[in-house]
Amino acid sequence: MVGSRGERIVSGLWTLAVSRIIFPLHERLKGHDSVSRLHALEDSQWWTRERLESDRMQRLRDFLCGIAADVPYYRDAFARLGLDPRGVSSTEDLARFPLLSKRDIRASLDNMRSERAGKLKRYNTGGSSGEPLTFYMGKDRISHDVAAKWRATRWWGVDVGDPEFVVWGSPVELGTQDRLRSVRDWLFRSELLPAFEMSETNLDRFVERIRVRRPTMLFGYPSSLSRIAEHARRRGVDLRGVGVLVAFVTSEKLYDHQRTTIEQAFGCPVANGYGGRDAGFIAHQCPHGQMHLSAEDIIVEVIDAEGRQLPPGQSGEIVVTHLATFEFPFLRYRTGDVGTLSADPCTCGRGLPVLREIEGRSTDFVVAADGTVMHGLALIYVLREAQGIERFKIIQETRKHTRVLIVTGPGFSEKSREAIAAGLARRLGEGVRIDIDVVEGIAPEKSGKYRYVVSHVEAASRHA
């Protein structure tokens, strides 16, 4: 039995206080309307598909008309192409509108901002696609993403304020552990474990923290959680009784063997999530096993290589329109991910459409010269911070030799090359040979998928 009855009652009361009082106050002070959005989303998820689609089309027309009037980039584009947003009546009509790539945003960053925008917050993607991106979010967008994630969390019987361990690696999270952030995490009972360094020592520490702190939920990369789970198994540590009710995974492709490893180690289900800083909180798995789209504010299209919309059941590139991005629009944004929509509803009864399959988004681990195992994103962030890098691929040939292929753009210089070499050396070890090659382009794998961190170090040595 996990804890005494009295401890469980106290824990439940704390969760209630956080979810009903402390977190709503936190969001209000930040100027977010996440709480009212949560209530609206928890109502609309049970609407019929017809009602959801009717409401969404009205929001889409409002969104398109708004950005046509107030966003220089789209005002010019719509005028040039002769597009009238008022005539949009279905998702199929979106095919007339231009696709948006990371390159487009980088080239027109200032013109992407609405002339009516309030204060916007600057964000960077991690660059796991090989194309790091700078963009902006307004409070409306942030409120939606918080509420959509909050709703999906509650599907699994857990809530904000329940004890959680977050296994993550973004500098946004790891670089802001000041006193205010520490107090907030203490109040919300959220503890961050760095995903970049999966050494034996750190894995021992992670397993012990989980065993002692007994979190109700886990959140992190599937590769990182599965490594912790596998490490606990090798050490003979049984984590099934610590009280984890669900493990939320995101930011990478979830493989079947990872799901099995995590579920067996913690004795809980794994809830897959799909989204990103740029495209937003797109889809999340419900307890019935289906990946529901956050359809109230998110429209997902699947397109072929020529940009044509594909019907449910056919695989293609996922393109996202986020209707809560008036201030910095994401209209038909190309994610670079491959997936398939489903025509069938979920048996849970929610009217939210289903994303049947997601491919790609897989990032390898790499091994430092001293044997330390690190999440591949530890290297990706070095490239992201360097000036003038448009695309890249990191290939770890051996522990002593890593190659980097880069496609350069404006701003690249010898200092950029030196910064990359120095940053990788700090992570991989000063004795590692790092070759940096400037190339015209980077080809995909034979499968057609892109991999941006590839390690040829034997898997067995990663556990040494």
Image: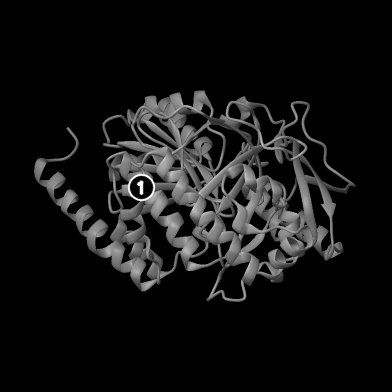
Of residues 460 and 224, which is closer to you in this image?
224
Q: Quick check: 377 left or right of 444?
A: left
Q: Quick check: 378 left or right of 30?
A: right
Report x, y in % for residue 407: 84, 51
Which residue is drawn at the image coordinates 31% and 53% (left, top)? 160
Query: What is the number of callouts on the image?
Result: 1
Quarter of the figure with residue 157: top left
Quarter of the figure with residue 229: top left
| Coloration of the structure image | one colour
The amino acid at mark 1 is: Ser
Of residues 275 and 173, which is closer to you in this image?
275
Which residue is drawn at the image coordinates 71% and 60% (left, top)? 105
Which residue is drawn at the image coordinates 70% and 60% (left, top)? 385
Which residue is drawn at the image coordinates 62% and 76% (left, top)? 115
The furthest residue to the left: 6
Q: Quadrant of the C terminus?
A: top right
The furthest residue to the front: 87
Residue 154 can be seen, yes or no:
yes
Quarter of the figure with residue 376: top right
Report x, y in % for residue 235: 41, 28
Report x, y in % for residue 21: 23, 63
Report x, y in % for residue 394: 75, 43
Residue 374 can be seen, yes or no:
no
Disc 1 packing (10 Å; few <14; some 14–19; many ≥20)? some
Of residues 16 and 173, which is closer to you in this image?
16
Of residues 129 and 64, which is closer to you in this image?
64
Circle 1 SS class:
helix
Disc 1 designates what residue?
44
Q: Is residue 170 above or below residue 242?
A: below
Q: Quadrant of the N terminus?
A: top left
